[in-house]
Image (spheres, coloured by chain):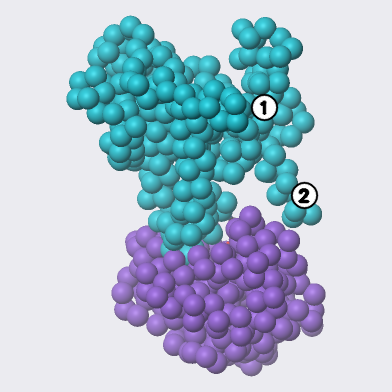
Chain colours: A cyan, B purple
């Protein structure tokens, strides 16, 4: 269940980008992978502790994300969904190939005493990195919620997500908000990737199955709600923990796919979307 | 303070406004009437810069704003309360209002503006923690107008504020508009409720299929055969 924090951390960006720009960031996996590699590279080349890597990754990925929005994504925003899907799929492939060129296809992992540390809580041996990643997942949730509800910029982002024209009418520069939201989404993916590198070894192909889980989580949560993502991540990790008791572990990845299909049929608006619809009457 | 010169607007290839010229002086309530699809909403959207201007000029206190970004127009003191309210349904009333103070000029006074809106619409205050999607039509309209006021506008543009409201609520709405005007805000009011709009207006314009076909004081307009036939059913 601790894995819920990880699932959430790697999905917030996807939900934020979908909420504001109404496009699905197929390159999410690429940025997760890149976040993991940058963490590894900073560690092996410069001896930067992996826990400090996000201090560099978050601002860099933010800038890269906003630049990507300004140069490429912006051009396809009004177009059919397939166009942005293809574009971002292309971005993913480019990132992947870059990683092959720079870091080769060898499997990488980070080794520090921190990675292997455990603590015993109530008689259970828990891996410290897992606890840490869970805590980060919660922290990002709280931070994002505060940002989105308490600051003008955060509220402008929510307003743009809910009704773009209305946001324009109160003076929000929605083009700028697009860039910022995409930047934050990419920064969150990079941060998620950095966290992943604490738990898994990885190759440039890293993130493929995890990406499917991200899609499952945001669909479960309601596509554009940050709290929904946390719910979705929790539900999926519970479903998986429960599922492995009754089926071979090799089928664990199937669970997210089954959940995805079931949710799309039963609750197409996700948990939060359905609650909202009920609340509105 | 607001002047339109031979304004033309099109959606793609479809021309919607032709050579529209009109003027709103400081302190006035100017009403814009016309049948469905005449182009009233488009006219307001051109002023708030949420639809591109094809030709012509829009001047606000002598400064051209027809190429300015929408954010700049709000910053300059023009608030547009859109047709259909367009509140953010998943935010509560207070968050909707507070976002109205998004322009830097308005942010410093957000608490005072909020109090002002609450005095104007006490019912909005009672509902401040409620999510907007759950409000009645009249309450939503009050929040929408309140959100417009939160930007501390010098000119408030209202697009059919009485649409879909019960008659008694409509009267409240018109009374509120009059009060807002008396407090010093100029008003440009689009209405289908022609009689009531002309009762509170200083002047009016009639738009038909994208052109201004008449203008004058309420008395002049009420006396014209055109208005009588088309809008008052006389
Ligand atoms: N986004 C749009 N794209 C294309 N055409 C549009 C668009 N919005 C409005 N139109 C067309 O422009 C014309 C004017 O519409 P507009 O909404 O400005 O009229 P209106 O006077 O506000 O009407 P109503 O009283 O129904 O609100 C109509 O023929 C309408 O079909
Ligand atoms: Mg209209």
Using a 10 Å C-alpha cutoff, classify the residue at mark 1 as few (fewer than 14 neighbours), some (14 to 19) or many (20 or more). Answer: some
Q: Which residue is mark 2?
A: A278
Is there any visible trace of residue B222 in the rendered image? yes
Left or right of residue B164: residue A124 = left
On whether ligand 1 comes within 8 Å of the CB at mark 2, the answer is no
Residue situated in front as seen by the camera: B80 or B18: B80
Q: For the point 46% across and 48% down, which residue is it?
A: A143
Number of numbered discs on residues: 2
Q: For the point 42% across and 23% down, which residue is it?
A: A117
Instruction: Indicate which disc, 1 or 2, sits on the residue closer to the N terminus.
Output: 1
The answer to whether dots 1 and 2 both sit on one chain is yes
Q: Which residue is mark 1?
A: A238
Q: For the point 32% across and 70% down, which residue is it?
A: B64
* Residue B191 percent across, percent down from the top left: 65, 75
Residue situated in front as seen by the camera: B105 or B225: B105
Up-down: is B11 above or below A48? Answer: below
Up-down: is A110 above or below A146? Answer: above
The image quadrant that residue A186 belongs to is: top left
Is there any visible trace of residue B50 in the rendered image? no
Q: Chain of mark 2?
A: A
- Name the quadrant where ligand 1 sits: bottom right
Up-down: is A106 above or below A123? Answer: above
* Residue A33 percent across, percent down from the top left: 39, 21
Residue occupying the far front of the picture: A123
The image quadrant that residue A236 belongs to is: top right
Cα separation between marks 1 and 2:
25 Å
Image quadrant where one finds the N terminus of chain A: top right
Up-down: is B214 above or below A136? Answer: below
Left or right of residue A244: residue A93 = left
The image quadrant that residue B41 belongs to is: bottom right
Using a 10 Å C-alpha cutoff, classify the residue at mark 2 as few (fewer than 14 neighbours), some (14 to 19) or many (20 or more). Answer: few
* Residue A10 percent across, percent down from the top left: 48, 30
């Amino acid at each position: 269940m601790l894995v819920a924090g990880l699932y959430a951390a790697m999905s917030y960006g996807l939900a934020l980008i979908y909420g504001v720009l109404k496009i699905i960031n197929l390159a999410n996996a690429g940025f997760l992978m890149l976040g993991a590699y940058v963490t590894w590279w900073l560690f092996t080349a410069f001896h930067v502790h992996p826990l400090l890597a996000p201090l560099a990754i978050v601002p860099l990925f933010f800038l890269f994300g906003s630049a990507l929005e300004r140069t490429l994504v912006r051009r396809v925003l009004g177009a059919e969904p397939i166009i942005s899907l293809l574009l971002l799929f292309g971005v993913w492939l480019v990132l992947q190939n870059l990683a092959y060129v720079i870091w080769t296809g060898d499997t990488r992992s980070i080794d520090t005493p921190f990675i292997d540390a455990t603590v015993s809580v109530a008689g259970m041996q828990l891996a410290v990195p897992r606890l840490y990643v869970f805590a980060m997942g919660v922290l990002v949730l709280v931070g994002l919620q505060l940002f989105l509800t308490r600051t003008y910029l955060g509220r402008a982002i929510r307003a743009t997500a809910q009704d773009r024209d209305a946001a324009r009418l109160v003076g929000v520069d929605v083009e700028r908000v697009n860039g910022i939201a995409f930047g934050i989404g990419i920064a969150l993916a990079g941060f998620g990737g950095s966290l992943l590198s604490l738990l898994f070894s990885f190759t440039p192909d890293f993130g493929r199955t995890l990406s499917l889980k991200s899609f499952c989580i945001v669909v479960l949560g309601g596509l554009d709600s940050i709290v929904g993502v946390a719910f979705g991540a929790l539900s999926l990790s519970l479903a998986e923990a429960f599922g492995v008791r009754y089926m071979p572990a090799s089928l664990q990845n199937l669970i997210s796919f089954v959940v995805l299909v079931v949710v799309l049929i039963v609750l197409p608006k996700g948990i939060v979307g359905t609650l909202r619809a009920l609340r509105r009457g | 303070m607001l002047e339109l010169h031979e304004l033309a607007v099109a959606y793609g290839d479809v021309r919607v406004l032709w050579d529209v010229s009109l003027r709103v002086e400081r302190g006035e309530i100017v009403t814009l009437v016309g049948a469905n699809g005449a182009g009233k909403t488009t006219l307001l959207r051109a002023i708030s810069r949420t639809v591109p201007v094809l030709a012509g000029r829009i001047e606000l206190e002598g400064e051209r704003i027809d190429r300015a970004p929408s954010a700049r127009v709000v910053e300059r003191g023009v608030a547009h309360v859109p047709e259909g309210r367009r509140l953010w349904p998943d935010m509560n009333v207070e968050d909707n209002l507070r976002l109205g103070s998004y322009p830097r000029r308005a942010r410093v006074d957000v608490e005072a503006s909020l109090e002002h809106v609450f005095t104007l619409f006490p019912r909005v205050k009672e509902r401040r923690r409620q999510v907007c999607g759950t409000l009645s039509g009249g309450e939503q309209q009050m929040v929408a107008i309140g959100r417009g006021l939160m930007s501390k506008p010098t000119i408030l543009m209202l697009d059919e504020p009485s649409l879909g409201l019960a008659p008694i609520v409509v009267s409240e709405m018109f009374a509120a508009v009059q009060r807002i005007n008396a407090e010093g805000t100029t008003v440009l009011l689009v209405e289908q409720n022609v009689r009531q709009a002309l009762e509170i207006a200083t002047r009016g314009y009639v738009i038909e299929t994208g052109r201004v076909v008449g203008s004058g004081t309420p008395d002049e307009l009420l006396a014209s055969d055109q208005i009588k036939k088309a809008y008052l059913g006389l």
